Image (cartoon, coloured by chain):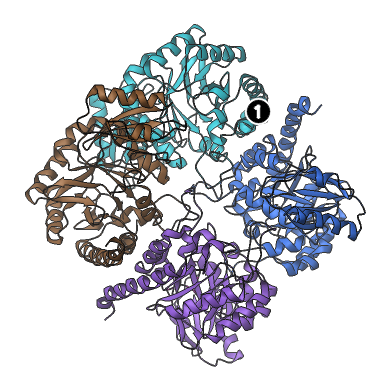
Chain colours: A brown, B purple, C blue, D cyan
Amino acid sequence: MIIELIEGATEEQRDEVAKLVKGLGYKPTYVQTQRGEYFVAIGKADFDIRVVGHHPHVRDVYRVSDAYKLVSRKWKAKPTRISLGDGVEVREGGLSLMAGPCSIESEEQVRAIVGHLSQCGVQIMRGGAFKPRTSPYAFRGLGLDGLKMWHQVAKEHNIKIVTEVMEISQIEPMYEYVDMYQVGARNTQNYSLLHELGNVDKPVLIKRGISGTLDELLQSAEYIFANGNEKLLLCERGVRTYESSYRNMLDINAIPTLKEKSHLPVIIDPSHGIGVRQHVKSVALAGVIAGADGVIFETHPEPERAFSDAQQTLNFDESKSLVERARAVFELRKSFDLPAES
Amino acid sequence: MIIELIEGATEEQRDEVAKLVKGLGYKPTYVQTQRGEYFVAIGKADFDIRVVGHHPHVRDVYRVSDAYKLVSRKWKAKPTRISLGDGVEVREGGLSLMAGPCSIESEEQVRAIVGHLSQCGVQIMRGGAFKPRTSPYAFRGLGLDGLKMWHQVAKEHNIKIVTEVMEISQIEPMYEYVDMYQVGARNTQNYSLLHELGNVDKPVLIKRGISGTLDELLQSAEYIFANGNEKLLLCERGVRTYESSYRNMLDINAIPTLKEKSHLPVIIDPSHGIGVRQHVKSVALAGVIAGADGVIFETHPEPERAFSDAQQTLNFDESKSLVERARAVFELRKSFDLPAES
Amino acid sequence: MIIELIEGATEEQRDEVAKLVKGLGYKPTYVQTQRGEYFVAIGKADFDIRVVGHHPHVRDVYRVSDAYKLVSRKWKAKPTRISLGDGVEVREGGLSLMAGPCSIESEEQVRAIVGHLSQCGVQIMRGGAFKPRTSPYAFRGLGLDGLKMWHQVAKEHNIKIVTEVMEISQIEPMYEYVDMYQVGARNTQNYSLLHELGNVDKPVLIKRGISGTLDELLQSAEYIFANGNEKLLLCERGVRTYESSYRNMLDINAIPTLKEKSHLPVIIDPSHGIGVRQHVKSVALAGVIAGADGVIFETHPEPERAFSDAQQTLNFDESKSLVERARAVFELRKSFDLPAES
Amino acid sequence: MIIELIEGATEEQRDEVAKLVKGLGYKPTYVQTQRGEYFVAIGKADFDIRVVGHHPHVRDVYRVSDAYKLVSRKWKAKPTRISLGDGVEVREGGLSLMAGPCSIESEEQVRAIVGHLSQCGVQIMRGGAFKPRTSPYAFRGLGLDGLKMWHQVAKEHNIKIVTEVMEISQIEPMYEYVDMYQVGARNTQNYSLLHELGNVDKPVLIKRGISGTLDELLQSAEYIFANGNEKLLLCERGVRTYESSYRNMLDINAIPTLKEKSHLPVIIDPSHGIGVRQHVKSVALAGVIAGADGVIFETHPEPERAFSDAQQTLNFDESKSLVERARAVFELRKSFDLPAES
């Protein structure tokens, strides 16, 4: 059960509601986010929901049978809009494109990519400053210095930044230089990190785990939401299987399913989802027609020379073509939905 | 190595080529199909390919490094076109729609569906007369009698039939009443059945195995081709994974990858690929934009009353909408490819 | 519900029971095996089971909630014993060893292996006469002639034969020369083949599918049982996963789980289960301590020269050591179970 | 390449070796652990290894072709022994038993379990003070206070403690109260946490990831070793698959394979590996006969009342039986290995 409190509820009023809920045999968790105050109440007893709904300090109440609550579409039919500032927004009904290199390598590289994105009208740049690497001897990224340089260049062109945060101690120093945090596939169930990201007032894009279920992804989002941050995005990036023709198996089913289950925007990552450069575009368009609210993909001025992920990174011509086609596919999808919406 | 013989080669000429190939340390398999005569030669020795290519009885020769040979795009850049008669054709550059019920249930049901398909301009009807069922106590289909009735009704409306063959002894009695045989996911590696389908002069649609690799699917097609039948279609229908939100995980990556690896048409089955009725359409469109040459899906006048697969079967309104949108998406995809082709 | 009929029930008496069952809203399937006559009745209505149990032509009646019925331990607590003749028996409480090459290659090879097995006291020999191969160009076995030769040699030494049957048309010609049929992993859901094996009065060892579930394996056994043959063995041989350090992942959990679910003997195949020669022994012993009723493994006089599966085949020294240790582990396991059994 | 330095090498001598290595085109990483000083050198150039081996400050040098280096058995044939103090040791050739509850719940519970372990001669107790939970609303453990209480009770009975560390900030406060840190399956690729655990002088037990490969597990161990801590244990705990009869699929193949690949001790976790109480014992014994150096399992005075993992936790009778049988199986295994070792 999710109980939305009235605006400006006092502590006393809050306690009163908590007491009522406990009296019904439910365990309330108080949640305060950028957009409201809630109790998430867990329990199994049967009772007349109007007892809660009619309470003067309660704005609304919802039964949510899913294991995750706050991120469920069962209580929040209206989809979440996430603003990155300067009019850049990620939301259902829009198509947000995010592109950039696997790793931030140099100012020259960053300037080239920022220029390319500006030309294509892409407003959000992805890239790794801190890189999780399977081997301890591999390149682990330029770190905070790289991020600062990147931020400087991106700002000049009004490009927003999304980049991975790998540990709690990085959240604070990164804060000034990022517009969106990313939680990587290997950290999707790093609950301590998720909990801390609940204290931050910047959007977080959460990648599905290496072999994660959709319910686990939604529960990971719930962790952040339950600790105060509801600016969340879900990202499908393929899962591990036995098939060796590609790096991962992009789960296209996840797109319409996540859209049905949750009110959060859903982003598709075709670069990791297939990991084969010549097919990234096809898979990206599949994601758009299937209902994705955005695409995040890898591009580099010279993919063959990229420090990492060379085999799945697009050059600028390929990137431009993906952007144009994704927009055309999105327009077609919007035309399908029109009658249903009006 | 694939050696294409000249048209009308005599047995003597053929033997001469075989002898040459053996002399090079290769093991030749003679293959005669509806469209030509070949030797597939397996070996590892190094030699000057012109020795074979310039032989007077040889039309052309190709090195194919893939484990599968005859179905590889490495020797046959021009994609295969498959005619079902009366101008109905499956081919790269077209979009073949195939729809119908999981099981053929009654003449009334068949007439309703045939009428619906005619209205939508769908020329190929799917349906099960012989049904592979996990439990021996479940409905196993109407069998040959059902197929004959179906054939009669379909013929009246010039609708072509694709249906599953489960065993060798069914091939012959079914022959007169089907336009395309289907090999189901549970029989994809039933090599005896595949071998026998090489003796038939009707197209065969081969489904990927429950957890089959793309290479296994291509090798299964190779079995049929190597025994004489090159009218083959590949079908992606989802694979088994740990994710329990849907019946299977449709592998969208398979579409562009199979198109790259093989010259055979690639069909997507969104009904089994996700198994969730309300999302079949999204997944079907994803397949079309990603490059599928056709879509095969389940429809029924009253899905709730279907003998099997009720939860993934579309009603006629949903089916009509899928058909219209698939065509619109296909037109958009064609517009993308135009510059590249011209 | 499984209804066991009295011995020697007449057709009239049978019909009477069927009528009673239908009257309760259940659909009866009549099953006659080597050991009895049954009705398997499928339905959902609630009724007093004594109505059936007290019927004079009914010996006993059991409610079975599993999807599979006749192979479930819920009705047949006493485990199945399977005799291969000449005192060779597979059963719970025993340890049946089965060994031999991947493929039957020559009389010399067969004689060597038969001699080795005799020395070790192994009474059952495995080997492939008909080989399912992924590529149509690979060696497909010596066929019926090879089987006849093998049978001749094995008979001289009183060794029993288990070998794969790939299609219905092979069942009859193989009959005279095999002591146990094997259904391979790729044919586990070839329901037509399973159905026909119900008509045979020889044991059938059924391998789990490439990525098969335990329930599917049990349903495949149910197919054969429901058509008249209850001499069945279940075989765990590893499943396909993403892990590339070995050929398959042997599912050790399957051993105690299948023993709990079914009254049929459970055999472990460590050769395919790991596919790495130096670890076959460890995995085999794990299966024995976990409760397997038998082990089937690959051995060859010169594994490096075997036509197939060279990398997972033991030489005779390794094979002898496996046999000795398996027996020692089995003795230890029996000592554990003693108090429970007495 | 791993270069072991002479004991007591000065900084100057070290720099000299580093310079030599760089001169060969290799990138050296300096590693100092409790047991020695090394350079791990990554590169591809070909050179005469004696150039390095004969250098006066180099004790020994090894080529290691695996992606992981320091944890590979290719350079360190002698297996690692790990001391927990007071004569408690984990090592190849021994059998370390570790048992305890999923979560530490109360002093009463801890006292009961400590008493039980003492009776059975089990010297290491597992238990969760900080619990990673899929849902943010579930019980997350008693935290540091619980750990302190547990430590006090365990110390009285000379029982060692292994418990999960979830984040970097917990390492330091936990230090005084644990004998071995555990990295859980969801944190196996939390590289920041692994890196920090390299700075600690206490053993670390690393669980395989939810769907982790063996190579990833070994690379995770490499992370810790490369940052200075070589007291490491590897733990197989089952992986996620499509099979729904159990919680995870215990990968028995992993036991002999990890023993072959690495010199680190390998522990089996049958509780998570199958997740079904009545089969935990069978799976544990399978692990022991297959070569595990230890078993970690869940036990609780009243499993039905446990805060978490009730369905896979043994009561004390079951636990005692597991311990006794595991020891008997281990003795049998030792008897097998004797000839090979002598």
In the image shown, does A89 or D48 lie closer to the viewer? A89
- C143 vs A210, nearest the viewer: A210
Q: Residue at x 74, y 34 (%)?
A: C330
Q: Is residue B80 left or right of residue A103?
A: right
Relative to B1, residue D272 above or below: above
- Whether residue B123 is in magenta: the answer is no
- Residue range in magenta is B67-75
Residue B24 visible in this rendered orientation of the protein = no
Task: Where is residue C202? Give x, y as percent.
Answer: 81, 57
Q: Chain of mark 1?
A: D
Q: Position of residue B38 (x, y in %)?
A: 53, 82
Residue B275 shown left or right of residue A63 in the figure = right
State the image quarter where residue A40 is shown: top left
Q: Give the residue type at disc 1.
A: Leu
User: Where does label 1 land, which residue?
Assistant: D338
If the image is split into quadrants, where does the C terminus of chain B sit?
A: bottom left
Numbered circles on residues, count = 1
| Residue A119, position as x, y percentages in the image | 12, 61
